[in-house]
Amino acid sequence: MKNFEQMGLAIPEILLPKNIDTNTWSVVACDQFTQDRDYWKQVEQTAGTNPSTLNIILPEVYLNDPDKPERIQKVKKTMNEYIEQGVFDSPKKEFIYIERKTAYGRTRKGLMACIDLDSYEWKPFSKALIRATEATILDRIPPRMEIRRGAPVESPHIMLLVNDPEKVVVEGTGKNVKANGTAPCYSGNLMHNSGSITGWPVADEESLKVLNQALNKVADKNTDADGNTFMFAVGDGNHSLATAKAIWDEFKEKNGGVKDADGYVSIPAGLENHNARYALIEIVNIYDDGLTFEPIHRVLFYINNGDLIKKIADELNGTLTDCASKDELAAAVKNSNADFGFVYLENGVQKFTLLKTPVTELAVSRLQPVIDDFLKTAPDGHVCDDKGCRIVKPEIDYIHGTDEVFRLGAKENAMSILLPPVAKDSFFATINSRGPLPRKSFSMGEADEKRFYLECRKLF
């Protein structure tokens, strides 16, 4: 039987604030509400002068502001102050089982753990234990490295998915700690009507044994014929985890580690158990009933609609039919695994076209490359409106919600593409065979259902 380390995991030393008030301490992931400064101003007002994770993160709404260096310096200063002033209780070596109730009536379960960054790889077609789910954009990593480099504390919004239809890892751990009568280590509401959260420590010998057995069971079922185990996939925080790995590699090199031809940096003697080798994350079962996977739809502007529809149909070996209404199209796409809906104007009349395909992988993994290829050679459009006539470049945007698909598809010079639900049972298989999914492939719930910062861990 493999131990935690052999499965890319470690028991974290969790830092929690004394007398924790989740309503003021916890704030939503920094990559949410990035176009809504008012939201983050309201967060500041709610937190007030109380200790808060708001003061030890940098909301990405401010990432391109001229005062970013000063903000980062203040974040690290506050981290040190929280340690020195006794804001945190003494660290506890434990996993934490979490139940997060959202404002939408859903309960998502999770397990706080540390992962070994040497067991994670974001590069396409990696066979690492822990893999990226979406393409990693390299130029998004350096700004985030500025925040993590030398930071004394980390608090994560990273969520890893585990392929566990039998629900033995996260859910099984929860049943076990509750059956044992374990008292929660925190419980409370989250700000701005974002639901509530409760966490139970997982530290006793029997609970750790049960968890290890469950992880081994999942590992066995996710090991391919070549012996490669796909243990976890990054659900949220892909670039944050890539940043953590980049900082660990940088730290190893600066302390004598040697980089090989594949880019792996050896671990210098004495740093085998350094805190920077690990990242604090939350494990969530992809089959959790409280975890919603929403497709992210596409809308294209200033293109020849017929040309793109034909290209997609040809490339995916699909068949096209017209639907009489938006309700008929929406129902057809929703009840499929890999069928698409096109919404656009033709001679002033809104059209609803259904493309049925035989695709067995996640639909977006086949669709987006065709769109990308089309846009490389698509001719410029010609628009005349109240601003006059002009030449415009084709554009693509990514949209949430079926209503928005039909709203935008009713506009001139636009075509929306309605994507089917994300098939959980083909999620891991698609990434294993095709590598990370295209950008903007899926969304895990609504913005205020994302992970809230709460647990911390010493880093540097």
Image (tube, rainbow, N blue to C red):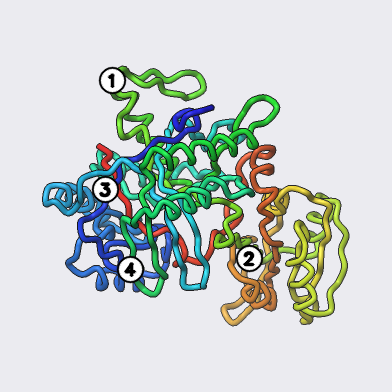
Disc 4 crowd, CA 10 A, few/some/many (<14, 14-19, 20+): many
**On screen, residue 296 above or below 36:** above
Q: Position of residue 81 (x, y in %)?
A: 14, 50
Separation of marks 3 and 2 at Cα, in angstroms: 56 Å
- Tell me the SS state at disc 4: helix
Q: Position of residue 74 (x, y in %)?
A: 19, 53
For residue 64, which quarter of the picture? Answer: bottom left
The kind of residue tagged 3 is Leu
Separation of marks 1 and 3 at Cα, in angstroms: 24 Å
In the rendered structure, which disc, 1 or 4, sits on the residue that comes first in sequence? 4
Mark closer to the observer (1, 4): 1
In the rendered structure, which disc, 3 or 2, sits on the residue that comes first in sequence? 3
What residue did someone put label 1 on? Answer: 270
Pointer 4 with pointer 2, Cβ within 8 A = no
- Image quarter where the N terminus lies is top right
Residue at (39% x, 63% y) in the render: 197
What residue did someone put label 2 on? Answer: 391
- Tell me the SS state at disc 3: loop
- Tell me the SS state at disc 1: loop
In the rendered structure, which disc, 4 or 3, sits on the residue that comes first in sequence? 3
Inspect this view and state whether residue 371 appears: no
The kind of residue tagged 2 is Ile
What residue did someone put label 4 on? Answer: 40
